[in-house]
Image: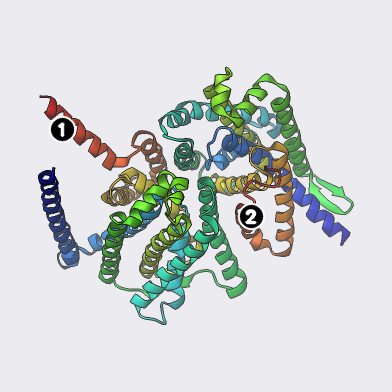
Amino acid sequence: MRGREMDVAIFTSKRSLVSGSIILIILVLLATLPFYSAGYTVVFLTSIFMYIVITVSWTMFSGPTGYISLAPAAFFGVGVYTSALIGFMLPLPAVIGIGGLASFCLALLVGALTLRLRGIYFVMFTFGLVELLLHFVLWWEVNITGTTGRVVPTVDNTTVYYLMLIIFAILMLTAYFIRHSKFGLALQSIGEYEEAAAHTGVNVTGLKIVTFAISAFFIGTAGAIMATRWTYIDPRIAFNPLLSFMPVLMAIFGGMGQLYGPIIGAAIFTYLEEFLITRFPYYYMLIFGIIMVVAILYLPNGLVGLIQKLRKGVLRRHANT
Amino acid sequence: MMVKILDIVIGGLLMGGIYALIAVGLSLQFGVARVLNIAHGEFIMLGAFVTWWLYTKVGINPLVSLAICGPIVFIIGFILYRTLFTRLRISSASPAAFEGNSMLACFGLLFIIQNVAILIWGAGMKGYSYLAIPVNFGGAIFAANRLITLGFAIVIGLIFYLFLARTRLGKAIRAAAQDPATAGLMGVNINQVLALCFGFGALMAGLGGTLTSMSYKIQPTMGLEYTVIALIVIVLGGLGSIPGSYIGGLLLGLVGSIVTYTEPGLSLVAYYVIFMFLLLVKPTGILGK
């Protein structure tokens, strides 16, 4: 028995060593990428990382707890507007940090108000939040400041790329530690049976609020960074409701069972978006809708679930012969 | 002063009639069939565009279109539930999982229906003029088509209320709303009844769309706004209650009318504030238990 545990321990440590070095190699490759690739690749990869950051952040909260949040666009927009409001006053890292913090605070407030609600009401509330902020900022700009839209200080593409990569790395570390800690286990228990979790001593509401806010922080930083690439923003760009649906779609398509599922989903979808927009600009949202319906119907556990199922099938066949 | 008040109140009620009608549809889909149909507004848009198309191309009276659009969207809704949502309901682990999955599938439907409409009719604003005769109410002036809209919205709601209260099928629907599993044991063909409910929900949306097109400009992306309004109304009036939907709809119409009068840009903001406040304070609505 003991020996077997040892074997498992050695096996897993070997495996984590291998996967750790693979991750390191990928990170080094990504970090040196701007030195040997064309400008377009860097811009394109920045978009991919933006979606990955939003999707992984979304999954961090909504994956284990099962509370579907449609607020990402709100947090993203807050980040974008932070960048526009203080971008000319402060150095970029400070702007990004403040953008994240602003989203963090908004999420604390929203979470404290709503996370007692039943699942479906939470969905409606978060969706309403995006539209509320959008229309409020729009009204504010038309009636109070008298100008719609703002100019954001621009930053060169390579810097934007590196900033997004850094946020991505920090996010992945955070997501990994949350997943493999007591904290993550408690979150999982909320998703499975909230009352039981509360009875076993988990501070259900507190935990949900904090995780929701952490996930909002990263979405806010992504918004603050992306704003610098757009140079001009207005409420409809900043609080685009599509940015609330995309992470949901990407996470479901990739599969939420594993940490890398949302990454795969986001990467494939961003590529698909780029491809469809250039080739079939009129059909692209239509094709998106069809993929969404098909993914929900036939891929309940996403691509990752499908791969695992296929792998299990192969193993079983090997065992039989 | 008096005229202004009349203007605001009647204007609000006229708007509220349509709100109520589409909210009854959503209430049926969400309260009984358990599908939070985010694509509800797309059925309104379909109804509106088919009506516009029939009127400008073939010359069919919009009121006659009620009898054409209704069945079309009903069949679309019924088939969607029998194929897509029944499958999802069976494969989902729990009712809560089905609520989540079906809502996400509706997002997919939203994109599909909206973009098919853009491909067919283009993305621009459309409109036609029908019965735009001014009617005078003690100084406040309204177009006749808006009054007809309110009249039909109330009549349709009343007919549906009687249908639920008096017929055998209505009883089956009410049973399914309370407890689908037990209703199934009592011999109710539950898949059929839920699909009918979803179809009726789409029907209400389609009729609402036809009525909307008579007095407002329409465009393929108009759906989401109506969906959100319908959501607010059912949260306001209480889920699954037809009188509640009517009270909620007329109330929201009034609020919208008052806010639009004082600060036009803020009407949507006011809707969302009411909506979020209600969700926090009393998510079961005014008439909810």
Distance from the alpha carbon under mark 1 to that under mark 2:
54 Å
Q: As drawn, is B204 to the left or to the right of A230?
A: right
**Residue sitting nearer the eye, A306 or A160:** A306
Q: Which residue is mark 1?
A: A315
- Classify 10 Å Cα crowding around label 2: few (below 14), some (14-19), many (20 and above): few
Instruction: Identify the amino acid type marked 1.
Output: Leu
Q: Give the image location of residue B177, x and y in percent.
A: 60, 31
Q: Residue at x 80, y 53 (%)?
A: B9
Q: Residue at x 74, y 35 (%)?
A: B152
Q: Looking at the image, which residue sits at the far front?
A: A2
Q: Quadrant of residue A132?
A: bottom right
Q: Residue at x 35, y 74 (%)?
A: A154
Count the marks: 2
Q: Which mark is residue B281?
A: 2
Kindly check if marks 1 and 2 are in contact, taking CB atoms under 8 A apart as contact: no
**Residue sitting nearer the eye, B201 or A122:** A122
Position of the N terminus of chain A, as image quadrant, is top left
Q: Chain of mark 1?
A: A
